[in-house]
Image: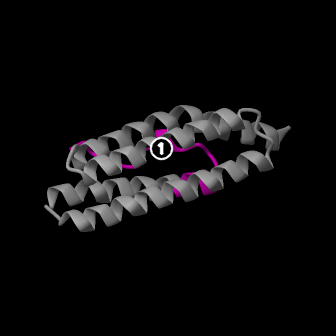
Amino acid sequence: MIEILWDNKFSVGHNRIDHEHQVFLDLIKNASMMDEMSEPKEKILRLLTEVRKYADFHFFSEENIMLDCIYPEYAEHKREHEVLLSRLDDHLNDYRMGEISLEQIVDYLFEWFALHTSSVDKKLGDYIRMKSVG
């Protein structure tokens, strides 16, 4: 398993977004620890469903922020959110069917989170700061 810890490189400089990212990362970490504790599959599926629901909530929240500040890359950013949710649904189904491991889901989520946050979300944070100054 990969080590999952909050790092300032994930910070986008917007309090609400950063807080929601910390919660999301904590849920991913909890899922990772369940694999190590040999939790029952039903309990793991409940937590993965929570991760999925939280991701949907967070994306909706972040998209509202983008709309409020008239973010010019809203459509592309929203599309990335939709792709993550769709792929996560596929991964969850594959896990239910025994086709992939929990570790594969956790790795996917963390890699997506790290890449998306440090690139796409950082651009959003920069735009919000620039707009509030100008």
Picture coordinates of residue 15, whole percent (x, y): 62, 55
Nearer the observer, 65 or 48: 48
Mark 1: which secondary structure? helix
Q: Quadrant of residue 33?
A: bottom left
Q: Look at the image and name its color scheme.
A: one colour
Which quarter of the rendered picture does the C terminus lie within? Answer: top right
Type of residue at label 1? Ser
Instruction: Please indicate whether residue 43 sits to the left or right of residue 59 in the image.
Output: left
Compared with residue 95, is residue 54 higher up or lower down, i.e. above or below? below
Q: Residue at x 72, y 45 (%)?
A: 66
Residue under label 1, please give it. Answer: 86
Picture coordinates of residue 27, whole percent (x, y): 38, 58
Q: Residue at x 50, y 52 (%)?
A: 21
Give the magenta-colored segment's residue range.
1-20
* Neighbours of disc 1 within 10 Å: few (<14), some (14-19), many (20+): few
Picture coordinates of residue 32, whole percent (x, y): 26, 53
Residue 2 in magenta? Answer: yes
Nearer the observer, 129 or 120: 120
Instruction: Please indicate whether residue 81 sits to the left or right of residue 52 in the image.
Output: right
Can residue 10 be seen here? The reply is yes
Can residue 4 be seen here? The reply is no
Which quarter of the rendered picture does the N terminus lie within? Answer: top left
Q: Residue at x 15, y 62 (%)?
A: 37
